Amino acid sequence: MNILTQLSKFLFVFLIILFTLKDYTYLGRRNEAKKRTILKNQIQILFGMEILGYLLIFLNTKDLLTLALLGGILVYFGVTIGCFHLMYARSSMLLVNNMLMLLGIGFLMIGRLDLKQAIKQFVIAAGGTVIALIIPVIIRKLKALSHWTWFYAIVGIVALLGVLALATVSGGAKLSLSVGGVTIQFSELVKITLVFFLASKLARDSSFKSVITATVVAAIHVGILVLSTDLGTALVFFVAYIVMVFVATRKAVWPLAGLGGGVLAAIAAYFLFGHVRQRVVAWKDPFAVYDTSGYQIAQGLFAIGAGGWFGTGLFLGRPDTIPVATKDFIFAAICEEFGGIFGICLILICMSMFILIVNISMLIRNRFYKLIALGLGTEYAFQVFLTIGGVTKFIPMTGITLPLVSYGGSSVISTIVMLAIIQGLYLLREDEGEEYLEIHR
Amino acid sequence: MRYTGDPEDHTKEKIGSDVRNILKGKDVRQDTAPLPDLDDPEFDPDYERSSAQGSGGSPGGSFTEGGRKKKKRGAAYIFVSYAFVLIFLLLVAHLIYFNVKLKDDIQNSPFNKRQNSAAEYIIRGKIKSGDGETLAETEMDEDGHERRVYPKGRVYAHVVGYDSHGKSGIESRTNYQLLTSHSNPLDQIINEFKGEKNPGDTVVTTLDSSLQKVAYEALGDYRGAIVALDPETGAIRAMVSKPDFDPNEIADAWDSITADSSNSQLLNRATQGLYAPGSTFKIVTALTYYRKYGSFSGFHYTCTGALPIKKTTVHCYGGEAHGELDLPGAFAHSCNTSFSKIGLDVGTKRLTDTADSLLFGQKLPSAVATTKSQWHLEKGASDDDLVQTAFGQGRTLTTPYHMALIVSAIANKGVLMKPNLIDHVENDAGVLVSQSKARRERQLLSAKEAEALDGLLQEVVKSGTGRALADRGYQAGGKTGSADYNKADGTPGTHSWFVGYGQKDGKKLVLAVLAEDGGAGSSTAVPMAGRLFDHYFGS
């Protein structure tokens, strides 16, 4: 058993390295046939990793449910790939592959830690994907999306105020609302509405006045989140805002002023809010405050340290000792049992995902859609940075999940939807190209 | 990195210059003529064409212009994507740095309970002295129960530590190595199939078992501590603390030991016991004088046995009047009034600077848990406080280990070597796994300062309070101390100190000896040091 696990851990590392390399070779290839081979290989790796992982989980837990879940996951992967292929022949399959790989890594780690959560995650991801399949159609049909500027702003602020009310009532502990057994994290929804607001505001008019309006609305968003102690999301919003204003105005003054303001706000927050201070203290020396705020970070570091380069192998580490191992600290759990090299590949896959999104946004001509793609991509990239940086003690922990990998319904759905929107924009651009050709034929 | 099918990546030079313009805050749009707005938020493929015509060009011409404009916008996108690629790569770099540099510290952190899970499939390895004596090993009884055994019992209680109710000493510091197995891979696979545990690695310490035994016996029934180390390599040769405990019985005796607060048996007094340095602190004061004047030759003083300061009067030990003295003489006879004069001469600032440079109040490099020395001489301190500190009776507190480190730097041309307790790690069959090397920690004082202080230390043995160490077949230098303190019952007592070094045939040993309530340094600590030196240098 032990030997099997030991051997499999090298196989996992090998597979993920291969997958990551394919990601980047794809980005450089132009030959369509070669691209198709790459995509096919990636799908093989994806299936191989999931099967290997779940067989190990089954051998360790002797729970038949794991095999059922494995079956479900494989069917889900197959159907998702098939649907995108059939419904949107020209969608970016690399984006789909990466999305499924990240979900797959999540399924493995969550399944090893807590099968019930894995099943829930699986159901939610499958549901989210169904929604995702319709989104490109909506994007194509609803041409008025860019007109609803203030609708996005109002939805965002109202949803966040709801979160704040909850946080105030529960003393900062609750940032989500339970409706009939389903917890909804509003800030995940607002991630999308804020980007839509900024895109529609700035695409039409990037004058000083317009930027100021956008700034005020974005500041309200960020401010509410800071008050409701959701620092991670607040930062994600802030960075998305800066990037979008910069790209829309193409003036470096804005991001610089924004960064300056951000630094001042961060310093003010440090002195004003106890929870901000706590995070910084725990980051500087988690062992000095080991019994309180440093405990989580310390456990995460122990896990990453125990994993080393190749990991301990599934079930041979103690990721169960990390608090919130399936959510905020999933990266530490992955580094422990799958190893540091696997962790590095995971970062690189997230990076390729981001590059892909920027790529798509550059190919789109329509300014509104361009900004949306870049805004969503920025949110994704920065969230990855915050969570992995926080877990590895590179930056203070902000309490945010790793998109698609971490357990969490709202986060998974919103990320899948975000990717579907980008997919829809990608298809639009293909339309653009087609119609353009028709006109100039 | 290239972007798929992007028509714009043929124009890198242009984009590069645009990125620079953007960084300079220029609006890149400004350097081209007004263009049709391709960027209307509405999705309207016809719009491009119609507005292009509106600007007066041919459809083809406007398309190129439009293309050019897109490149400019592309610059901002590329800039953003590079910025994010950079932060992703920073994450990767940090993770690599963590695995290369920080991992060992994290794994050996005393908070880290994680390796204990390795105990499920690894038998905790042995701890040995440098000369091969077993100091700790795990035995199995017939039922397969494991028991940690310490064959030398109390002698190594503090330095080797225990592995029950938490961990201490080397047991704690090398927990990871002890629970890692580098035994023959084939054997490991066989054990795996048999369902047996693999043997963990053996940690071989730098401790010298015979010297440790002599130190343990020399301290006798005194409470206190002895530290012995090689100043040229930083290897710790002996470390004893009393009162002690039997690590073999710690599991059963835990409650009674921890309840006994008056003895603090678990405290390693060598590294964690805080004591007034007494006259051993005169090393620091003398160094401050040397740093101010560049030599000791300018100091002359006539000691009458007492010196009134402001509110207090300083007395020499036993009220003795030392008469006319130069600095080496004052040091050798440990004249308090002379050093009060020196303290007043150099002042608070200089004394504090020197103490700082010798690591007072700072974390000490160490392989086992240590306590920082405490430095209490604030800016604007009264002359009374200043002179008390200058001859070692102020509120300054230090550990025997810290004083040993200071002397080891003096005995090694001013360089403090990284103190080391672990010589190497080997697998259960004795095959080397990792070897620790002598590393330079830092230069505490200059070679010239070290030489000057060495002269003072030698003078103590030649003509002063350490005369008992003269003519014993090796060369020695050191400083005694008699630190007054108040006992728990309020009556006055005196801790007996000796810090110094011996050398013979290129072999050096630094000692710090502290006997609680042992009286004058020369009467208790010096003879103890003598026994250790005699043994070590083989006389």
Image: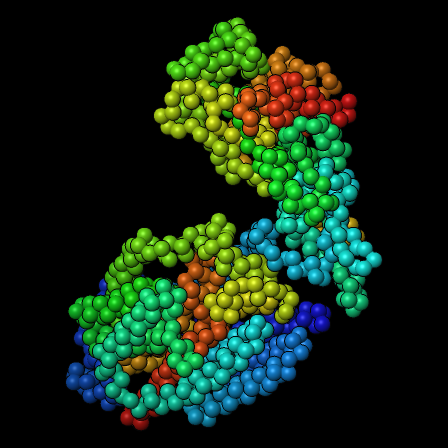
Residue B214 coordinates in the image, percent (x, y): 74, 29
Would residue A32 appear left or right of B509 to someone viewing this image? left
Q: Using the rendered view, name the quadrant where residue A438 is placed.
A: bottom left
Give the residue at x 27% y 84%.
A145
Give the residue at x 66% y 21%.
B524
Quadrant that contains the C terminus of chain B: top right
The colour scheme is rainbow
Q: Using the rendered view, name the quadrant where residue A10 is placed.
A: bottom right
Q: Can residue A220 be seen in this view?
A: yes
**Relative depth, front residue between B239 and B342:** B239
**Relative depth, front residue between B99 and B252:** B252
User: Please, is residue A438 above or below residue B225 in the view?
Assistant: below
Residue B202 coordinates in the image, percent (x, y): 73, 49
**Relative depth, front residue between B360 and B3:** B360
Single out the residue that lies furthest toward the right: B142
User: Please, is residue B149 above or below residue A212 in the view?
Assistant: above
Quadrant that contains the N terminus of chain B: bottom left
User: Please, is residue B212 above or below residue B316 in the view?
Assistant: below
Would residue A3 appear left or right of A324 to someone viewing this image? right
User: Please, is residue B209 above or below residue B346 in the view?
Assistant: below
Q: Can residue B86 be seen in this view?
A: no
Residue B223 coordinates in the image, percent (x, y): 65, 29
Residue B160 coordinates in the image, percent (x, y): 68, 42
Give the residue at x 52% y 5%.
B324
Tally the marks.
Answer: 0
Give the residue at x 40% y 26%.
B349
